Amino acid sequence: MNNSSAVLILDKVSKSYGNGLAVDEVSLSIRENEFFALLGPSGCGKTTLLRMLAGFETPSSGCIYLDGTDISPLPANKRPLNLMFQSYALFPNMSVRKNIAYGLEMEKLPAAEIRQRVDQVLATAQLGELAERKPDQLSGGQRQRVALARALVKRPRVLLLDEPLGALDKKLREKMQLELKRLQHESGITFIIVTHDQEEALVMSDRMAVLDGGKVCQIGSPAELYENPSSRFVANFIGVSNLLEGVRQSTDRVTVNGLSLQVESAVEAVLGEALAVVVRPERLQVLNERSEACDNQVEGQIVEIAYHGLDTNLHVQTLLCDKPLIVRVPSSQIEFSQFSQGANIRLGWQARHARVLTR
Ligand code: ATP
């Protein structure tokens, strides 16, 4: 596990362009040997934030500390941070080995040290057999690994990655996500990755920050953000959510569209307050006569059945909201004859499996 000492601290960092605020007082503390993801929709300020860390943009206000030192005065090439761009920008006329060695040669390191470090990185990135090839003789995934190896060989304190898997197709992307995680782990270098792909952030990162409109909405581990989103925005952005808009009726009950739902008891409940009850699709159960009792039950009609291989999503229209609820059932556990479009079913969930959001 990561130790908790901070490598990089952002203290109320903002960036404005003209009248627009691209990054709005972002404060973050990124730990030693951490895989940290900056996640958010297009235009939320992720890239601007990364470029300020790399030294390609200057903050309008706020400070960035690396190992306790304010790095704001340092130009990009003097910072012990390395930014890997989405376009890998390999030198086409150089071999893989030469591409990787280039940065160290520029630093005028002794030839023996360069060879040793390049060999080590070639092995880590599983590129040994491809060392003499030119970039145009490589697949997309291999080129991506060369770009990573080239960044890792310089042993930056922090490696910044801007949508590093953006150019790859889905299958390769999934493979490279695990690869990237392994490389991070083995190199012991702190990675900060920018992505708009929530699944990618969930798979790869130790912790992530969700951004919206230049502000940090929530920071936490993937499981924390998924299980305990702090706002409707995060609940919607991370994974699939059933959001039921209602009004607080008592400490442990919420009225949603005239129906009373049980929720976990809240000490600071404000009666009459507008809020949302969030239930993840895998927490909804299809009930039958044999089912154990659920705190909440609702009748509904199946309006769509979406088969995803491992799982099947049932879209069920209920009286709770206009949108159908999404119910995820393992495909292996259902008999398709049991479900058909238009069929009536009963759904249920336990109060402890729902979250109540006021924002
Ligand atoms: P995407 O996922 O689409 O790349 P992003 O989250 O990385 O988006 P940024 O590129 O950081 O977003 O942009 C944040 C905001 O700042 C946007 O509204 C963008 O239009 C604006 N912006 C970024 N760079 C500039 C610039 N050089 N001049 C003016 N506005 C800019």
Image (cartoon, rainbow, N blue to C red):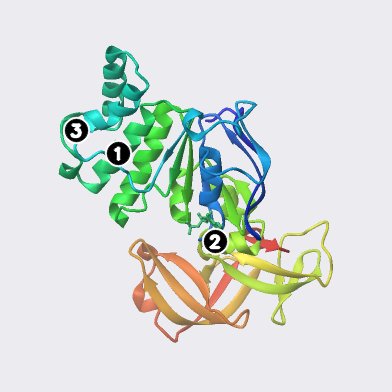
- Residue lying at the far front in this picture: please name it: 18
Q: Nearer the viewer, mark 3 or mark 2?
A: 3
Q: Going 28% across and 23% down the picture, which residue do you hit?
A: 118
Foreground residue among 324 and 180: 180
**Residue type indicated by callout 1:** Arg
Task: Name the disc covering residue 145, or none.
Answer: 1
Mark 2 lies on a secondary structure that is: helix
| Residue at the disc numbered 2 | 237
- Position of residue 105 in the picture relative to residue 190 (left or right): left
Which quadrant is home to the C terminus?
bottom right
Q: Going 60% across and 31% down the picture, which residue do you hit?
A: 71
Task: Tell me the CA gap for discs 1 and 2.
Answer: 29 Å
| Residue at the disc numbered 3 | 95
Q: Going 34% across and 18% down the picture, which residue do you hit?
A: 108
Q: Nearer the viewer, mark 3 or mark 1?
A: 3
Task: Tell me the CA gap for discs 3 and 2.
Answer: 41 Å
